[in-house]
Amino acid sequence: MVKTNHKTIVVPTLTDAHSPLGALQTRLRELEARRSELESDLVRIRRGKPPKSIADTHAAERSARSAALVGDVIHDAGSYRVRNPAPISFDAEAEALREELADVEGAISILKAELPAADNAAQDAVCSTIEGDFKALLRQLAVSVARTAALHARFKAVTTDLNHWDIKWTSRLPNPASIASAFGDGRDTNNKADAFLRDVVAAGVIGIHEVEEARNG
């Protein structure tokens, strides 16, 4: 968030700018989580330790079938939980899990194929939303740099005169030597400030005449 002349530029998120991207990402996260659950359940079944939910369902169904056989003579037969007399086969459950896992993986592949286009559309939407204000901010920056470069030229004119008259000013007056890295030393016509101004002019953000006007005050 940047303020330019009291105007705030709000950069939206990709999903705010393009809601379909958010929907795809949310569904992908859900399906990836479900895939992890299915894979974990299948591993447990292979180890003979099925997930509690599957084991409980299996036991409940067996108890219900057993209760049905004596329900006419025992009123509350349904309250009993029957122990399994032998190891239970979870082949059917495992097959169902594998089928669902295949479906989930297929859906994930479809989502991943769609994500690049949705992401690209979201990128375009974000940049389109802030483009006008972004260019205005960059133009203001260019004007400021041009004016500052003009002030630096005046500063260099003074220090040039001091040097010309052999005035030992550097120990008596402020000497911000680091400024040369941005604006050059007066002989440098390819300094960073000038390079920046050439770049923004080339990008069409500001006209060369506006830069010259800013330099000339």
Image (tube, rainbow, N blue to C red):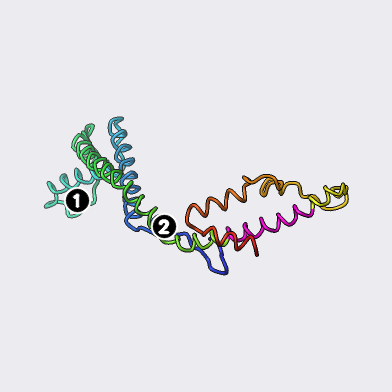
Image quadrant assignment for residue 52: top left
Q: Residue at x 51, y 59 (%)?
A: 207
Q: Residue at x 58, y 48 (%)?
A: 195
Mark nearer the viewer, 2 or 1: 2
The secondary structure type at the circle numbered 1 is helix
Which region shows up in magenta?
Answer: 141-158
Residue 64 point in image, percent of width and height: 18, 48
Amino acid bearing label 1: Ala
In this view, the residue in front, 126 or 23, is 126
User: Circle 2 is placed at which residue position?
Assistant: 126
Q: Residues within 10 Å of mark 1 (few under 14, many from 20)?
A: some
Q: Position of 22 compared to 163: left or right?
A: left
Q: Residue at x 35, y 58 (%)?
A: 18
Image quadrant assignment for residue 101: top left
User: Circle 1 is placed at which residue position?
Assistant: 77
How far apart are labels 2 and 1 at the CA level? Answer: 64 Å
Which residue, as the protein is rendered here, is positioned at the far front?
164
The secondary structure type at the circle numbered 2 is helix
Residue 216 point in image, percent of width and height: 65, 62
Quadrant housing the C terminus? bottom right
Prevalent SS, magenta region: helix
Q: Residues within 10 Å of mark 2 (few under 14, many from 20)?
A: some
